[in-house]
Image: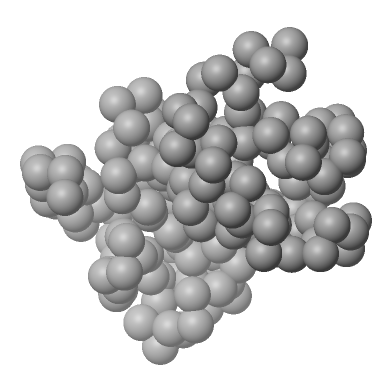
Amino acid sequence: MLQNNMSKLTEAELSRVKDICTQYPAKRASLIPVLQDIQDSFGYLPEGAIDRLSELSDISANEIYGVATFYTQFRFSPPGEHTIRVCQGTACHVRQGVQILNEVEQQLDIKAGETTTDGKFDLERVACLGCCALAPAMVVDDKVYARMTVKKIASVLSHYATMEAE
């Protein structure tokens, strides 16, 4: 099984995982920074990369998954082209932030934490975006959309849906 999953990665990708691993001491304490670097490199934690890390570190793939699944920062599927973050902090919450999130979920036909089937959008529910004076707020990629309303969502989403991949 290990060899089969690693074969899903190219030799260059397997080499990239090895290069990341060699930057850290071969200790369990290095696992999280190694996983962070692998995710930075691939955009997520591919199964083959975890298997390669297991082979190089003598930490079982099960243990690696146990650590990675504990932290919400790690993802196990490729990211969408565009990341949407909808604030659910106090200021946004009292200004209809829940309705904004619900409407985005409905229009994209996904729940927070998921990616659309076409790979165009990721949706994240966040505790605070740090722009409370602009509540309710939503961020797409790095652009902040302030004082969002349910009516504005379709327009924002259609703008990104029609963008060409960069």
Q: In which quarter of the image is the N terminus?
A: top right
In this rendering, is residue 117 above or below 107? above
Residue 94 in view of the camera: no
Q: Position of residue 97 (x, y in %)?
A: 46, 62
Q: Is residue 86 left or right of residue 19?
A: left
Residue visible at 52% across and 78% down in the picture: 91
Q: With 106 as the anchor, is 25 left or right in this view? A: right
User: How many marks overall?
Assistant: 0
Q: Where is residue 53 in the image (x, y as percent from the top left)?
A: 72, 40
In the visual, does 63 lie left or right of 50?
right
- Furthest toward the bottom, the residue is 133
Q: Can residue 87 be seen in this view?
A: yes
Residue drawn at point x = 45 percent, y = 37 percent:
12
* Residue 165: % across, % down: 16, 44
Q: Which residue is drawn at 51% across and 57% down?
A: 40
> Is residue 89 positioned above or below 6 on the image?
below
Q: Position of residue 61 (x, y in %)?
A: 81, 32
Observer-nearest residue: 143 or 5?
A: 5
The residue lying at 55 percent from left, 62 percent from top is: 126
Front residue of 62/128: it is 62
Q: In which quarter of the image is residue 32?
A: bottom right
Left or right: 75, with 102 as reference point:
right
Q: Which colour scheme is used?
A: one colour
